[in-house]
Amino acid sequence: MPGNPNEIKLVNNAMSNATRRKIMNFLDEGDKTVEEIGAAAGKTMLDFHLKLLQQAGLMELKEGTASLSEYGRNFLKGKEEKDQEKSADLSQAKPIEITEVRQLLPCIADSSKFRTIANMAPPPGGVLKVIEPIFPRGRYSDRIGALIIQQNEVITTIYGTGKVTMTMIKNEEEAKNRLENLKVTINEAIAKGVAPAPREKVRVEAMEIYKYLPQTNCGKCGDQSCYTFAIKLMGGETSLDKCTPIKEPEYATNLEHLQVLSAYI
């Protein structure tokens, strides 16, 4: 059973990918052939995904048939219990209001669109982490204490302090409508008093990652093309910070999108 830091790192890396999590949940139903796994989870990079799960000690593969290891079964059981504990009580949370839209500034990447900064009160704090499952493309970041939501090209970031930012907004009217819808969605969850059940995140394809990369094929990341980099990013073979051009001001909005998409890899 993994216990030392290197082994734990292998497990965390193996379970950081949506396809590998799907494979694990599929194997929880019983032993499966590689063909059955490919039909259920997709055949793209299947050998790579199975190899990582084996290296992490989560599954075993013999003569074309895969099964969960004892550690793999215990891991899923522990995760299920932890997810049940996360079904937090929201009965003490207070409804929020949008108190002001403070700024409407041109987006760096597209001067025809705007970046909005607003406030909500009272500050939602830890409620954001609990209600994350409400939003199909939402993820809570412990690092910045914020819930990040992607809706097409618009990215909304709600901070525990009550600050709200939105990118790629057409005008002030759209900003106000989106903020109002956000308020209603959050308050409906608070009114129910119980957090929604955790959900599997939307799967992201390599082409969607590629769409937001610089597409210059500069090779600074060590790969021949931006599309190759996107495929490796999907497979967990590289990291977004290896793409140095994406950190330039002209790609600021692209970077925000890629940071959101990375949560679903």
Image (cartoon, grey):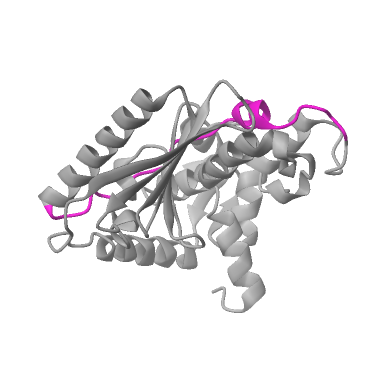
Q: In the displayed image of the protein, which residue is found farthest to the bottom? A: 4
User: Magenta stretch: residue 256 in it?
Assistant: no
The span shown in magenta is: 193-218
The image shows a total of numbered marks equal to 0
Residue at left offset 26%, top offset 61%: 84
Depth check, front residue: 154 or 50: 154
Residue at image x 24%, y 41%? 183
The one of 107 and 262 positioned closer to us in this rendering? 107
Of residues 8 and 118, the one nearer the viewer is 118
Rendered location of residue 143, percent (x, y): 51, 62
Residue 11: image location, x then y, percent = 57, 63
Task: Identify the residue at horizontal 30%, vertical 49% (top origin).
Answer: 120
Identify the image quadrant of residue 118. top left
Q: Quadrant of the N terminus?
A: bottom right
Residue 101 in the image: state x and y as whole percent: 36, 40
Which residue corresponds to the image point at 25% horizontal and 34% vertical from the top-left?
180
Q: Quadrant of the C terminus?
A: top right
Closer-to-camera residue (100/204): 100
Q: Horizontally, is 232 left or right of 29 in the view?
A: right
Using the image, determine if residue 210 lies above or below residue 134.
above
Left or right? Give the position of 24 relative to 242.
left
Kindly tell me whether residue 122 is visible in this rendering. yes
In the figure, residue 173 lies in which quadrant?
top left
Q: Is residue 144 above or below residue 103?
A: below
Q: From this viewpoint, is residue 198 visible?
A: no
- Is 199 within the magenta? yes
Location of residue 55 by image quarter: bottom right
86 above or below 103?
below
Residue 3, how many percent across, how many down?
57, 78
Q: Main secondary structure of the magenta part?
A: loop
